[in-house]
Image (cartoon, helix red, strand yellow):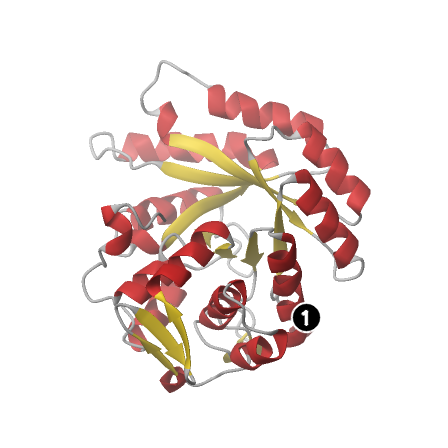
Amino acid sequence: MNLNTSEAVQSPAGAASSVSALLRDLIDYAGLFPPASLDMVSAVANYDEYLRSEWRWVLGRFIVPVARLDEFKEALAGLQTLKPRSGFRNWRLSALLGPEVVDDMDRVRAFNARKADSRSARRFVIESLEVKVSAPEEIKQVAGIVPAGMKVYFEVPPSGRDDCMAMIAHCGRRAKIRTGGETADKFPAPENVVEFIRLCAAANVPFKATAGLHHPLRSVHRLTYRPDSPSGLTHGFLNVFLAACFMWSGMDSKLAAQLLEEQSGAAFAFADDQVDWCGHRLTLREIAAARRNFAISFGSCSFTEPIEDLRALHLL
């Protein structure tokens, strides 16, 4: 998202420039994961459909475990057989590493190097990795295995987060926060989310989020798609990423926590040159810089729910 490019300064039809800057490439599609838990064929078909939709500019990477790359290739081959003349847009993948990092990196290299003479193979590339760790030593070990040019996001535990963040910064890597789950206890308090963002900003560490961000604003929703699903108060992705953009531009943690708790869409005003929340303003340039350098994306098992809610708010 570079302000020097025409794509970044031109807004899709119906979206203010500040909305475009905030949402572009924001949603990584994680249809394979709960609560959707789709099979590979369905998830691959969905991503292909979303890439062809008018909302493709909001779509980020396809999330897939390294252990399922062979299954992904089979599903992709089946899709190519069904649509032989339709052509394929570039697929950007983010792959989840398992416990055997060395073996997984061999699979990643093989995937990205496959059929170098095939034009279609070059359209499907793993451009980032994600891995869950429990201590700074694991971060150092994985960072030593993954090539420096490959983006890798470390999901760190709430306890010991300071030391983990220091190691991520030392290794020049990225961080990841879990913002929800299938039960209410999986949703961190706003203060904990803000503290994670503060640590990232202080260490100049880009981050992504995952889970629980199906809806733009903080609100009560069912936590799964089961008929008997409990409901709970969930974080909003507009809240989280606007708070991150504001903090990247100097907002203090106390005020950012209030922003994370904001439940009224009327409190936000998006214009072409800025966004306003309760008298606090971010310029278009500040939003684009924060998204490009800091608040990267979030993973969601649904792409349609966020889009439908954004349309209901008249942001799209």
Q: Give the image quarter of residue 184.
A: bottom right
Q: Give the image quarter of residue 195.
A: bottom right
Q: Is residue 22 visible?
A: yes
Q: Residue at x 54, y 76 (%)?
A: 260
Quarter of the C terminus within the rendering: bottom left
User: Is 18 situated above or below 150?
Assistant: below
Residue 14 appears at what percent x and percent y? 20, 67
Q: Is residue 27 visible?
A: no
Label 1 amino acid? Asn
Front-most of residues 117 and 271:
271
Which secondary structure, mark 1?
helix
Residue 246 appears at what percent x and percent y? 49, 69
Q: Within 10 Å of the Cα at label 1, are there few (<14), some (14-19), or many (20+) other Cα atoms?
A: some
Q: Residue at x 31, y 21 (%)?
A: 119
Q: Residue at x 54, y 21 (%)?
A: 110
Residue 314 appears at what percent x and percent y? 27, 75
Q: Give the image quarter of residue 141.
A: top right
Question: Residue at label 1?
Answer: 192
Front-most of residues 310 and 158:
158
Asked if residue 285 lies left or right of residue 65, the reply is: left
User: Is 252 situated above or below 267?
Assistant: above
User: Is 95 situated above or below 219?
Assistant: above
